[in-house]
Image (cartoon, coloured by chain):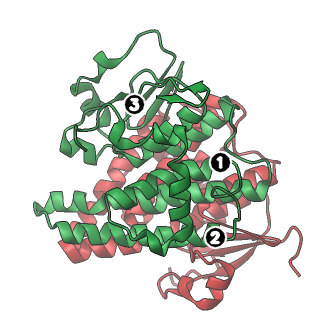
Amino acid sequence: MADEGKLTLYSYWRSSCAHRTRIVLNLKGLKYEYKAVNLLKGEQSDPEYEKINPMKYVPALLDGDTLIADSFAIALYLEEKYPEKPLLPQDLKLKALNLQIASIVCSSIQPLHNLVVLNYIEQKLGPEEKNTWFINLLNRGLAALEKLLKGCAGKYATGDEIRLADPFLASQIYVAIRRMQMDISSYPTLSRLYQVYEQIPAFQAALPENQPDAPSSS
Amino acid sequence: MKKTGREVRLAFSSTNLPTKERREADQPANLEENLLSSGWKSAFEPDQKIKLYNYWRSTCSQTVRITLNLKEYEKLNPVKYVPTLVDGEVVVADSFAIILYLEDKYPQHPLLPKDLKKKALNIQIASIVTSTIQPRQNLPVDIDFIEGRFDLDKKLLWAQHYLNKGFTALEKLIKDCAGKYATGDEIQMADVFLEPQIHAGITRFEIDMSEFPTLARLHDAYMKIPEFQAAVPEIQQDAPRGS
């Protein structure tokens, strides 16, 4: 029988989409059971996982007997079901800004650098070009985000409260800094924000290297 | 275009971008310069309140056009990326953000159900289109541009791979829904995102829709609806003649 109110997150330690979902859960103070799905080993295609999530996507959240896949959909669902510690402001303009930032990250940046895409590029153009591609993509995305955030001065991305934009930004900037060793000093707002995120427990607990399925040597 | 009992007055200011810029049309950076240089400014009427910058063929633009049609809105001023909406002093780019904004601000013809589970289903469908299918369908074009080669068959195969993968996921998500449309008997947000993607699949990427019977049935249903008909790419004012 499904447990009412029990949350289970199907996640991969290094998945950028799972990373931001973990931050959202932590920010809302929601406890969850962590179930690892190893994307490198293709576990998302295992019949057992397919039974839980026919779409085979990670992350996926099981809330009682409701399954939601896709980090954006999960975030908006959690926002509505657990309205304490809201991540979306009431003000329509600011709300739209947060949704825009989240959407840019999860449709214009991250999907173009997942494993399958990077392998495709390496195959067609070689490993050097793959890295160049990855860095160009990140630069384009970060430049757009930096531009969007200009003038939204506040402690966090869109003001003095942590909002939906922050987990999405944190997970994307992490990829740039930690995976591609990029110097992001030309994006001063994003650099500053990242330093702020590094101090917040909800963000720290969600870091890839702190997950149960992260390799212990990393 | 006159509809049963209701006139949909909607004029989309469209950008007429040259090929290279068109490929980048849904990417955030540099578009502002491209738009400014392609002379769109003269298309706008100064006293209109909402403006939509869009491109006839862009699936994201089509999604927003359908939404604006459903909410009976007129389009207006220009801005950055395609599509971009300017509503008074609020500027929103990105089709998903635009639609969620419109849903909040203009409650007529609501696109999201109150029921949380159904709402989440709609958002999942929208997100699958905007993050797993649409961004990747143009990818090979970018790569070929880098390579300087134009291997049409391989590009198509790549796009088809992602469309088929995405359509497979969508078909699974909606096959148990017994309603007239994707998530029930009313047009909801999922429908607005599905149709442009299905349209692109059929007209641009030669997807075999017999593998996706629910999506195919939905497409036929959407094509009977005036608000969807009016948003079809081929009839937009910036569509090439004879397309």
Residue sitting at the far top = B47
Q: Residue at x 81, y 48 (%)?
A: A83
Q: Which residue is mark 3?
A: B53
Pinpoint residue B34: horizontal percent, then vertical percent. Answer: 25, 33
Nearest to the observer: residue B147 or residue A129:
B147
What SS does tag 1 mark?
loop
Q: What residue type is disc 3 on?
A: Tyr
Q: Which residue is mark 2?
A: B175
Circle 1 or circle 3, nearest the eye: 1
Give the vertical position of A193 relative to A81 (above or below).
above
Circle 2 or circle 3, nearest the eye: 2
Question: Mark 2 packing: few (<14 Cα in 10 Å), some, or many (20+)?
Answer: some
Pinpoint residue B127: horizontal percent, then vertical percent. Answer: 55, 56
Q: Colour of chain A?
A: red
Quick one: quadrant of the C terminus of chain B?
top left
Q: CA distance from mark 2 to mark 3?
A: 34 Å
What SS does tag 2 mark?
loop
What SS does tag 3 mark?
strand
Q: Which residue is mark 1?
A: B188
Give the vertical position of B219 relative to B169 (above or below).
above
Q: Quadrant for residue B172, please give it.
A: bottom right
Q: Colour of chain B?
A: green
Pinpoint residue A187: horizontal percent, then vertical percent. Answer: 39, 43
| Left or right of A64, for residue A137 | left
Q: Quadrant for residue A36, please give it.
A: bottom right
Q: Quadrant for residue A183, please give it.
A: bottom left
Residue sitting at the far left = B148
